[in-house]
Image (cartoon, rainbow, N blue to C red):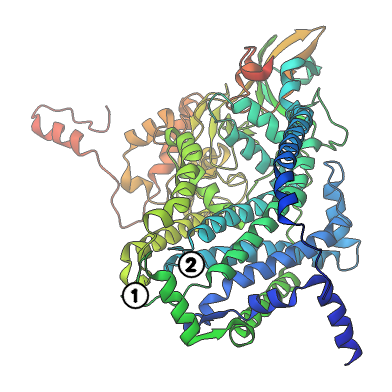
């Protein structure tokens, strides 16, 4: 067997306990302080996606294309590069949307994401309906809810026409709580 | 003294583990607990070790980047020797692990093993189940294909329903404004570092408690658990009529673990790896995302819940279910262990299993979704067109061309979202058909704006022919009543 360390005599142990206890407590406090100092930047780092939304906002004006690409009384799929990108997004920052040109410069630009749970809705020109493949949400051509589980119509992007081009204000995944802003409001962290 | 023993002694002198190991492995277990019913816990641990091992193997090749993940999986499937097999073992191992953990939980529940003094073992087990499901979901995300991409969208949409905090949580979940590289990276961190780390810690706690408190005895009807007497009774049971876990009881665990590993490998070899499905480019909208098997029940519930109940069910439901599971040993910590004397427990378990099974089964053919190519797939059956007038045939064209068939089946093909229309004329009169087409209702969109009067007339003429030859068409009883009770009624009853 490995020899055990010799026991300290009782008396000297007792005498030193209180002093060592104080040091131990100070040590604990020091480590607590270090933990707080360390935690602050770590938390800041972790919540940066939220802070990013509040500082610059995630919305930018994005060009969708020439007006000629969108014939009147038709609804067409358009694609744009998300204005905020990361380093290795691959093709995930190519975002589709449905552009409905009614007359002249009157448009409706719908998000691809179903208002129910975000699946990609598909346009059926023959029946003038958007249908969702996931849970059966259906919308009319103006984006209003026709049937199924969605509680509201399709999300819409704010648009403008400048120099013969169609622009939309976009940048974030539209959901029930991150969508209102896309209509030009200022809800939530949309800045 | 042999050389081997010398080496062993050298380590033992320093580690001093032999006693503890002997105590742990040779601890006495109740004779009846050395049963085939008690093998699922050890099997879950075995699969977990398999998952850690195959996961590390996959990490040698996998690239956790939104740009490259999908390509690296293709490379694993096709470019690396036996890469497909390791992916398949990891994927099937995941399914087996969820299944075995669920079976283990059901067994523990039915055998009353969560009762005193094993409450904390059960609670840790509940968290182990949640983490196992967490691993299954994050793993599905790492298979960065279209299902993973849109699955994340569903996750974000569910998160967004949280009151007040919704938008912040969405951005926290996605790591930015959209599903992109940062999203995959954080799910990689969760799947590879965070959840497995916690899982290992919790498995250790779980095991420690099994050793300290002893394995649950075989429940006998009438043998009541009481806090005051249980520990002594259990001690007597194990020490007077117990058997050492190693080597007497362990062989069943070992047999079953080996069988499970072989079963995982057999499935992997026969069925191959899971996906990846389509390339994760959101502009490819021709996709029908579906979750993995163990989340199909949720997919079905999300389609079938009334819209107004969805948000409460999504946000409060899990809190209630997890809360009940955690509280279970506290309001049922004593009493009967045997399932023969616990009818409510048995019925609860059966109902849960039947409900989840039904939802899962429904989700495999998702009758709530329109069939996106229903209208362009099969033609209208010839029998429905023979001997019909030109107007009726024109109606069949409208029926097909306006995508009615995406939701309504005829001749056995088409969507199941709306009712089958093969006998619709026996159920609805002409007037009712016109009204339904134009105004919709009962979950059907209104087609009033999309069909001109001529198209409606043709369509309804076609629909009126859809009834078996020997069954009369639906008739408007009220109109007939009105006509017969009025002596001077108009001769032309068809016009309204």
Image position of B253 (left or right of A53): left
Which comes before the other along the chain, label 1 or label 2? Answer: 2
Mark 1 on the same chain as mark 2:
yes
Secondary element under disc 1, as helix, strand or loop, is loop
| Residues packed near mark 2 inside 10 Å, few (<14), some (14 to 19) or many (20 plus) | some
Classify the position of the N terminus of chain B by image quarter.
Answer: bottom right
The residue mark sitting in front, 1 or 2, is 1
Depth check: give the residue in front, B347 or B46: B46
| In this view, A166 is above or below B182 | above
Q: Which residue is mark 1?
A: B223
Residue B73: image quadrant is: bottom right
Chain under numbered label 2: B
Which label was assigned to residue B145?
none
Task: Return the x and y of residue B158 as percentages of the image width and height.
Answer: 57, 36
At horizontal 55% and vertical 36% (from top left) the residue drawn is B402
Secondary element under disc 2, as helix, strand or loop, is helix
Q: Which residue is mark 2?
A: B108
Chain under numbered label 1: B
**Residue farthest to the bottom, as pictured:** B1
At horizontal 75% and vertical 73% (from top left) the residue drawn is B17
Residue A128: image quadrant is: top right
- Spatial CA distance of label 1 from label 2 is 17 Å
Residue B6 visible: yes
| In this view, B158 is above or below B20 | above
Residues at discs 1 and 2 in contact (Cβ within 8 Å)? no
At horizontal 69% and vertical 44% (from top left) the residue drawn is B287
| In this view, A63 is above or below B55 | above
């Amino acid at each position: 067997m490995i020899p055990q360390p010799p026991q300290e005599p009782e008396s000297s142990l007792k005498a030193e306990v209180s002093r060592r206890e104080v040091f131990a407590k100070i040590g604990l406090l020091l480590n607590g302080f270090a933990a707080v100092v360390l935690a602050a930047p770590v938390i800041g780092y972790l919540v940066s996606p939220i802070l990013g939304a509040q500082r610059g906002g995630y919305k930018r004006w994005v060009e969708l294309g020439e007006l000629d690409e969108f014939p009147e009384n038709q609804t067409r799929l358009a694609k744009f590069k998300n204005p905020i990108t990361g380093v290795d997004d691959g093709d995930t920052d190519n975002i589709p949307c449905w552009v409905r040109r009614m007359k002249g410069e009157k448009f409706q630009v719908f998000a691809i994401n179903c208002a129910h749970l975000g699946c990609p809705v598909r346009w059926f020109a023959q029946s003038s309906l958007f249908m969702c493949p996931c849970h059966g949400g259906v919308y009319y051509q103006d984006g209003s809810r026709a049937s199924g589980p969605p509680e509201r119509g399709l999300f819409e992007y704010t648009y403008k026409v400048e120099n013969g081009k169609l622009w939309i204000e976009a940048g974030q995944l539209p959901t029930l709580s991150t969508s209102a802003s896309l209509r030009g409001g200022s809800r939530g962290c949309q800045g | 003294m042999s050389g081997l023993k010398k080496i062993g002694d050298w380590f033992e002198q320093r580690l001093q583990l032999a006693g503890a190991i002997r105590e742990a492995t040779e601890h006495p277990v109740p004779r009846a607990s050395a049963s085939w019913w008690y093998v699922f816990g050890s099997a879950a641990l075995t699969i977990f070790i398999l998952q850690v091992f195959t996961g590390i193997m996959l990490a040698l090749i996998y690239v956790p980047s939104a740009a490259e993940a999908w390509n690296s999986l293709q490379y694993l499937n096709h470019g690396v020797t036996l890469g497909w097999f390791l992916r398949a073992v990891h994927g099937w191992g995941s399914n087996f692990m969820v299944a075995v953990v669920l079976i283990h939980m059901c067994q523990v529940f039915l055998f009353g093993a969560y009762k005193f003094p094993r409450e904390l073992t059960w609670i840790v087990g509940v968290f182990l189940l949640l983490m196992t499901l967490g691993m299954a979901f994050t793993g599905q995300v790492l298979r960065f294909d279209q299902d993973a991409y849109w699955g994340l969208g569903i996750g974000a949409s569910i998160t967004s329903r949280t009151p007040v905090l919704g938008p912040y949580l969405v951005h926290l979940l996605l790591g930015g404004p959209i599903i992109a590289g940062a999203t995959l990276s954080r799910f990689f961190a969760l799947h590879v570092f965070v959840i497995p780390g916690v899982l290992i810690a919790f498995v250790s706690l779980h095991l420690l408690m099994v050793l300290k408190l002893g394995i649950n005895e075989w429940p006998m009807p009438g043998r009541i658990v009481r806090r005051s007497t249980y520990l002594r009774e259990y001690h007597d049971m194990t020490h007077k009529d117990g058997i050492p876990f190693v080597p007497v009881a362990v062989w069943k665990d070992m047999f079953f673990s080996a069988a499970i590993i072989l079963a995982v490998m057999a499935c992997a070899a026969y069925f191959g790896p899971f996906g990846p499905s389509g390339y994760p480019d959101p502009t490819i909208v021709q996709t029908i995302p579906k979750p993995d098997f163990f989340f199909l029940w949720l997919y079905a519930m999300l389609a079938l819940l009334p819209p107004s109940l969805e948000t409460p069910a999504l946000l409060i439901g899990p809190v209630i279910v997890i809360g009940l599971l955690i509280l279970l040993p506290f309001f049922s910590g004593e009493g009967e262990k045997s399932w023969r004397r616990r009818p409510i427990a048995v019925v609860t378990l059966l109902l849960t299993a039947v409900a989840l099974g039904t939802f899962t089964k429904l989700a495999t053919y998702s009758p709530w979704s329109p069939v996106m190519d229903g209208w362009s797939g099969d033609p209208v059956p010839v029998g429905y067109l023979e001997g019909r007038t030109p107007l009726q045939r024109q109606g069949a064209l409208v029926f097909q061309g306006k995508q009615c068939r995406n939701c309504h089946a005829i001749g056995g093909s088409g969507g199941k979202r709306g009712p089958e229309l093969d006998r619709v004329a026996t159920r609805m009169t002409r007037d009712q058909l016109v009204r339904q087409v134009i105004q919709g209702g009962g979950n059907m969109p209104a087609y009033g704006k999309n069909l001109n009067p001529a198209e409606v007339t043709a369509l309804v003429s076609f629909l009126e022919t859809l009834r078996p030859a020997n069954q009369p068409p639906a008739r408007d009883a009220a109109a007939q009543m009105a006509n017969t009770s009025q002596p001077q009624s108009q001769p032309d009853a068809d016009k309204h």
